[in-house]
Amino acid sequence: MVHQRHTRRQFMHGALAASAALAAGPARSVFAANDQINVGIIGLGTMGSGHSHSFPGLKGVQVAAISDADMHRMGETANHLSNSVSQHQDFRRILDDPAIDAVVIATPNHWHAVMTIMACQAGKHVYVQKPVSHGIWEGRKMVEAARRYDRIVQAGTQQRSCPAVSEARADILAGKYGQPQWAHCSVLHAREPIGRVTEPQPVPDHIDYNLWTGPAPLAPVMRKDFHYDWHWQWNWGDGETGNWGPHYVDDLRNLLGWDDVPDNVVAAGNRFAWDDNGQTPNVHLALFEHRGVKVVLDIRNLTDPAGPGGEAGALYRDMRGGNYIHCEQGVIRFARGGGSATGHDGEPIKQYAGDGGASHEGNFIDAIRAGDRTQLNCEIAEGHLSTTMCHQANIASRVGQAATVEQVRETIKEHPDALDTLADMVRQLNGNGVDLAKQPFMLGARLHFDRTTERFVGDRVDLANHLVTGSHRAPFTVPATV
């Protein structure tokens, strides 16, 4: 049976029911080897649809319920699932169901935190896609909810389950290549602009826009395509820095053994060349320093007409994206599925063959069976920290002001790789016909971050901290105490 639209009163009733579910008795915490685990999948776009194929392939796992505010997407997914799968346009019906043991959250970013917290309160274990949050403060609340309700919460940065990353991490931390000195983390594939509309677009009748919007502002739809292109508008998405960024930033933190985030960042970027309804940068450079290691985060979604990358986008040392870690005695290159180490003379040292984290969903199920969150390869606390680093980069550029290339260069002059990256960005922008005098970089002052309070400190940080906290539309709010 498909459950459709609900009134505001029904929504509030459902929210209270979900919050009270734990008091009535949480879902099972430990499962026998032969026990079936019933999973509900919320959000049925590209990632959610993928999960609807992969989770049923895990031993002892059944996708018992699915949910999407878009009835058409839900129907398409139901076509390949068991006839017994229940369909709910309102995801809270899944949280109310005592037969559901775990939920997979693959909605747009702005729903991740609120939905994860509600699921924990309802006694469900959670697998939440990246970026785990739409803001730093709400990400911390996700961690607090997982702890308070003792739930297994896995972040969907699947490279944590890739054997190649684990092997390379062990070698780096054992000193095989000497001390890490600096790193370059990049996402360099080209995208297309999302087009421009000049008036609000109608929402199809099969989409409950109030439910789709949830904690975000109930703003008009100002984009040609309703789905996916929300990634590039701040109300709902976090740009490429929050889209692909969390994968490679999480790899970086994992490979270097970081259990926290940098306490300083400076960034410059803009949405260059495209006249569209997108708001997030398509070129973005952030510079961090942590534990003596300088890190450049390099995001570019433009083609490289006059460069070696061509129509597919830029290249960094022949890499389309991933991590380049420069150590005292060698260099580690890592992308999705594996990597390699070479000497500074280019001679091969070691190959790291991986699978891109194919066992990540299975790791989530194994941890549920054991009732042990320490078995998770990317427990929500790690996912929160990696996502926080991406939010730091976004915030650092969002609080910026127009700046010349020389001003950007002066701000990052202490790190040669940052200067080289800026020069390559300028070359690429010139190749795309960008006049930087008319469309300049937006450059922010260096921000300092208190890792204890997870807020920026110092002068003129009010706007930055407003972006840390964000805002949520009632009744879809994140409580101060979860």
Image (tube, rainbow, N blue to C red):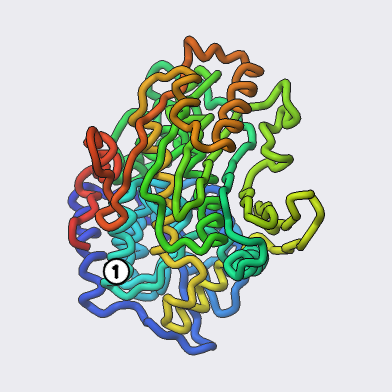
Where is residue 257? Give x, y as percent: 51, 64
Please give the name of the residue rendered at 56% of the width and 48% of the height, measured from the top-left corner.
182
- Write down the quadrant of residue 307 in the picture: top right
Please give the name of the residue rendered at 43% of the width and 63% of the height, measured from the top-left corner.
259
Residue farthest toward the right in the current orientation of the protein: 347
- Write down the quadrant of residue 12 in the picture: bottom left
In the picture provided, is 16 more to the left or to the right than 76?
left
Q: Quadrant of the N terminus?
A: bottom left
Residue 75 appears in the picture as rendered? no
Please give the name of the residue rendered at 36% of the width and 44% of the height, measured from the top-left corner.
212
The correct choice, above or below, for 430 with respect to 139 in the image is above
Identify the amino acid type marked 1. Answer: Ala
Please give the name of the residue rendered at 23% of the width and 33% of the height, measured from the top-left corner.
460
Where is residue 424? Give x, y as percent: 63, 27
Where is residue 279? Give x, y as percent: 43, 28
- Write down the quadrant of residue 393 in the picture: top left
In this figure, which residue is indicated by the disc labeled 1? 122
The correct choice, above or below, for 182 with respect to 380 in the image is above
Mark 1 secondary-structure assignment: loop
